Image (spheres, helix red, strand yellow):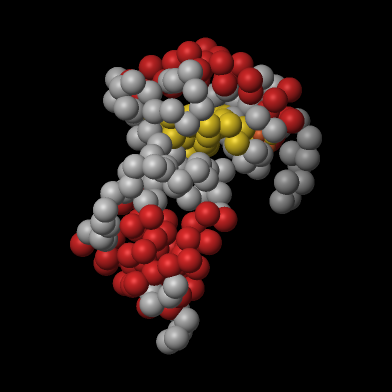
Amino acid sequence: MSIKKISKDQPETFMFNERSMEIAKKTIKNYPEGKQQSAVMALLYIAQRQNNNWIPLSAMKYIAKLLEMPYIKVYEVATFYTMYNLTPVGKYFFQVCTTTPCMIRGAYKLIDVCKKKISEKESEISKDGKSSWMEVECLGACVNAPMMQINDDYFEDLDEKKLEKIIETIKKDQKIQPGSYRGRTSSEPENNRSTLIGGKNA
Ligand code: FES
């Protein structure tokens, strides 16, 4: 999921830095001659990475020029797909799943923690400028509910205390550990497997 509202504050210009341009050029080369426009999604993602996790309109225009395609087509892609943020987000972007399995396992208690510890309003950057949060639909890790995505990683099997600890760790600029917060390996049972353990490929 992402923030589809276009930011009112827009930088005048945007350009890839040296590193982004290098990656963009390599990506464009992956496509056959005449099909370079197919790199648009990857280039939007590179722009988002470079620009503190959000894409300004000037980046869409820049990419349109680079790929020799109409700006409106880049805009359509950026506004359609959920992984693109079109307004600034915190350095740590909390996407809290509140779809049914996460909801019945306590997702709204996690939302209350986000309101208390990050910012009262969804999509509002915290006072220390470090974090923002938003509610999202299923992230496909329902078996480890309740869960959330922080930047690129999943944080699973959470509760209020564990989330508070994660937020405190971020405030101290320390590394946060992704994965299950009940010590599970992926989505395996908590107390080791008890069935299918004799099967060859189980
Ligand atoms: S319902 Fe939360 S990950 Fe699927």
Image point (73%, 46%), residue name: 202
Image point (22%, 59%), residue name: 17
| Residue 74: x %, y % from top left | 46, 65
Image point (26%, 53%), residue name: 12
Name of the residue lying farthest toward the bottom: 33
Image point (27%, 57%), residue name: 14
| Rendered-image quadrant of the N terminus | top right
Relative to 201, is 62 above or below?
below
Relative to 24, is 160 above or below?
above
Q: Can residue 80 be seen in this view?
A: yes
Name the residue nearer the viewer: 146 or 3: 3
Q: Quadrant of ligand 1?
A: top right
| Residue 107: x %, y % from top left | 63, 23
Relative to 53, is 32 above or below?
below
| Residue 37: x %, y % from top left | 45, 75
Q: Is residue 184 visible?
A: no
The image quadrant of residue 193 is top right
Q: In this view, does 84 lie to the left or right of 26?
A: right
